[in-house]
Image (cartoon, grey):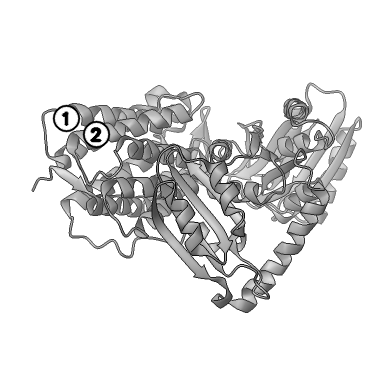
Amino acid sequence: MSINSIDGNLLKKAIAQGALMLRNNKKTVDALNVFPVPDGDTGTNMSLTMDQAVNEISKLKKCDVKSVADAAAWGSLMGARGNSGVILSQLFRGFSQYIPAGKKTITVNEFAQAFKNGVDAAYRAVMRPVEGTMLTVAREAAEMMIAESRREKDIITVIQKGIDQAEKTLSKTPEMLKALRDAKVVDAGGKGLIFIMKGFYLALVQPESDISGIALESDSDKDKTLYRESAEDIKYTYCTELFITGRQIDLEAIKNKLSTLGDSLIVIGMDELIKIHIHSNHPGMVLEEALRWGELSKIKIDNMKLQHREIIQETEDEEEIEKTDMKDLSNNDESNIGIIAVAQGRGLCEIFKSLGADVIEGGQTMNPSTENILSAIEKAPYNNIIILPNNKNIILTAEQTKQLTKKNVIVLPTKTIPQGIAALLAFNPISSIEENEQNMNQSIKNVISGEVTYAVRDSKWNGTYIREGDILGIVDGKLTEINKSTEEVLMDIIGRMTEDKEDGIITIYYGADISETTMEAVAEKLKEKYETFDVEFYNGGQSLYYYIVSVE
């Protein structure tokens, strides 16, 4: 059997099978973490990103190659989680950009070139690309497919060659990165990409396969609070959503026109693809205006008065109160600055809220998606937004939102909760956003962060064996302590964090598995040992991490 071209339906099946193959193997990918700590979420992030791409393509009625590629690009961009998810979304984005509008099928060479265009887009998206990662695996697979497509017209054969090359490259990633070599693992993102490619290959050799049950419920399906009106006395009846594909689309012109037709307006775009959401009594007029700018697709019009009246009313009443309060605080001054922080744990969320930030729940093992962050940005009644990711794996996702909103968004590179809190404490609401960015960045440099967690698998680090369940201490992202005692590891990392300081503040946020009595006893020991330091502790309520520590 050979295939010389791919049409929209086959591409749709291939993407869905790739998502299924990854979903079935995401735990294998998650386990390939350099440190054996409970944040090995590469497979989960990539799988959730793929699932949202599948959910987008499953809505398509028009299934030419370009429509499928665009839908997958949009879905993966909105669903992108973590660095691996962002890179994956850029692969799809570059792939779709290569395919001309209206293209119904692509040849083997066009497929290989589109994949290579995706690789180029992914490299551009990463500020400092590192070889020995998912990027390297994708690049060498693309180069092999392009070379093979010049002499082979069968797409199945070419993709198999690409998979073979990807696996060879993956096996060499420990030679390229010392961290992988020390941990005796291959790159997790590269492994995840290979599972996607294998699923793609499977769809080509089994084109009769049924994909109807592959799509999963995405976050955007689960959380409709951004788009709901109170069921009582709804002013605008119809929730209207659609996409516009065209050239030189003027987002501001569309916003200005549609703003007269309803409320809850969101207009966001990616290159030549724009998504519109609006509540209106005249959806036909919305469609007429949209038609001026290009071709319409994925049109969805819902009568909100018929949708779960009691549930929606309860939810929206709370949201309307919150929204009104936020508007009162901003005094409608568009120069004011809003702050969005990512945190996990009831106590930590409350701390960030008490300091004036809007909070997106997330962190280790539960990275928020591009769409989660973008929704928070669009809901905030400010034109200037500062985002505190508070996790190194969320920074790149947050950066993606800049191209999707007209608001001025600044992403501060906070990699830990202590850095985020320090940055927020340095925020001055009467200063300019430029001054705040400078001051908050400086505050990040002045804090030392520590974490106490546990090993999720057997491993080896710096010649020392780590057993599953061992307690691990991390200081500024570096694994420094291995022990059986949570308290001893905490004391050891605080010793490291204070060794060059004569005085300062030691702040501890204790997790859900630590009792207040235990924390009080530990604090007394610290006060006795560090007499020149102030010792503070708070109930963070975070899971997975027994203690999060800052020293300033």
Answer few, some or many: residues within 10 Å of disc 1's Cα (few below 14, many 20 plus, some between 14 and 19): many
Occupied quadrant, residue 225: bottom right
Left or right of 474, for residue 273? left
Q: Is residue 325 something one can see in this rendering? A: yes
Is the C terminus in the top left, top right, bottom left or bottom right quadrant?
A: top right
Which x, y percent locates residue 7? 21, 49
Which x, y percent locates residue 430? 85, 35
Q: Is residue 45 something one can see in this rendering? A: no
Answer few, some or many: residues within 10 Å of disc 2's Cα (few below 14, many 20 plus, some between 14 and 19): many
- Please tell me which residue lies in front, 2 or 384: 384
Which residue in the protein does label 2 denote?
112
- Please tell me which residue lies in front, 299 or 147: 299
Which x, y percent locates residue 495? 76, 30
Which residue in the protein does label 1 denote?
148
| Residue lying farthest to the right in this orientation | 531
Left or right of 9, for residue 82? right
Relative height, residue 11 to residue 182 (above, below)? below
- SS under mark 1: helix
> Which residue type does callout 1 highlight?
Glu
Which x, y percent locates residue 101? 30, 42
**Would you say the residues marked 2 and 1 are in contact, meaning their CB atoms lie under 8 Å apart?**
yes
- SS under mark 2: helix
